[in-house]
Amino acid sequence: MSLNWKEINLILQELDLPGAQIQKAVQSAFDVLVLGVYKKGETRNILIALSPRACRLHQTFKAVPKSDKPLRFAQFLNSRIVNGRIEEAAQIGEDRIVRLLVRRGERRYRLYIRLWSNAANLIVTDEEGVILDAMRRLPRRGETGGGRYAPEEAEAGVAALRAAGPERNYEIRELPGEGSFNEKIDAFYAGQGGALSLEALREQARRTIEGSMGRLGAALERLRAKEAEFAAAEKLRQYGDLILANMASIAPGDKWLEAKNVCAGEADGGRVRIELPPRLNPAAQAERYYERYRKSKKGLADVQAEIAAGEAKLRALESRLTRLLAETNPLVLAKLLKTGSVKESPGQARDKKCPGLSFRRGGWLIIVGRDAAENDELLRRHVKGNDLWLHARDFPGSYVFIKQRPGKTVPLEILLDAGNLAIFYSKGRNNGEGDLFYTAVKYLRRAKNGPKGLVIPTQEKNLHIKVDEKRLRELENCR
């Protein structure tokens, strides 16, 4: 449930924002922003949430997580209003739109915080109402840079319509707990207030991670069945030995060999019946069984490696779910669910893992660099000469790498997975299809005096990809 206009007025009265200096703007998610303000020796964090059914404005007493990478709107606010001073903080009529007038130097800005459940937004304009930027850019509403936003002009008409219609009574809710209304509303939304409540977020964590664990468990069962099948490969070698030992008793055209089994553990009264491959002499028949034995033995090692990796991932999912369910700060929990991590503070150790996005599929690792810096870092430190490189043709986009596995050729399905990622993380994604080229990393050379990460491929091959939404959804579960 969102705030009503009387509750917004009470929150603004308690905050007493005029005269406060804005010291920081932190955007932990695309719909959550926190302004750090300072007044009369006190620093406070003002939460602005645009989440459906829980859009609100109030002081938060929870720690505020930072995003892994600064988000666009927070960067804009830091360049324009941070270190500015709030001259006015008021609601426009009863319309649940809060206007903050901020002065920094010689310039004044208007911050409109529209707390409508299905159309919440935060819009920054100049003094004439020209939009400089918006937290949610909505072209259909004209809420993009260069548009105009002046809700004060429409308030008189809205007030007249409100007066002519049936009267609606709004009251300030009686919330449990002690302290100011800001404290009560912060605790209420943290505990049970819609999409950003702990209860809803924990249920989302269970549903998401337990679903992944279920799919991973089913895949492990299939791998274990294949492991048992490959583990019986020793019998194939024994069959080859028995064929060679009984060559004299095998006549041309025989389909079966019945012989005394010299290997311990066989049933059937110490005898075994072996099928003979047709149109082959006994030596070739034995070699056929030896070849099957060698393949099964190699396959066993691969399957066991995949099982070990799957079990490690399952343990990691269990550990992550435990951590998520133990988190008591809804802002941190929401951040963990969306990105998988919370930005470390300067005093904390940083994760040294591979940059970009990683996808594991059928024992193969696919890595996507999201920008020029990550592309360059991957090329310099995380990929090798025989790894495969893919990039959308004729469109700027991410570098996608398939890590090579010793003695393995990249399967078509993995190539299609990587191709879909290359088109999806490019400027051509809206076309739904596109061409890309791919080649081994060792056939890339850096462009002389070119920008960071720019390479020129040689010996490249072309591949046309139609974006497969189902494949992309499956890949999302492989991260």
Image: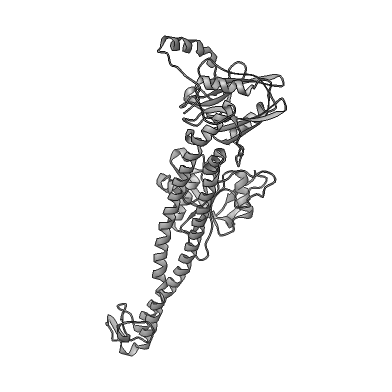
* Image: 237 above or below 29: below
Picture mark count: 0
Q: Position of residue 264 (x, y in %)?
A: 39, 84
> Foreground residue, 255 or 44?
44
**Residue pictured at 44% horizontal, 50% vertical:** 210
- Could one spot residue 279 in this view of the protein? yes
* Image: 138 above or below 441: above
Q: Report whether 436 appears left or right of 72.
A: left
* Image: 143 above or below 198: above
Farthest residue in the bottom direction? 248
| Colour scheme of the picture | one colour
**Residue pictured at 49% horizontal, 30% vertical:** 54
Q: Position of residue 161 (x, y in %)?
A: 44, 11
Q: Quadrant of residue 303?
A: bottom left
Q: Position of residue 362 (x, y in %)?
A: 46, 58
Q: Report whether 105 appears left or right of 352.
A: right
Q: Position of residue 478 (x, y in %)?
A: 47, 51
- Could one spot residue 400 in this view of the protein? no
> Foreground residue, 209 or 168?
168
**Residue pictured at 43% horizontal, 16% vertical:** 168
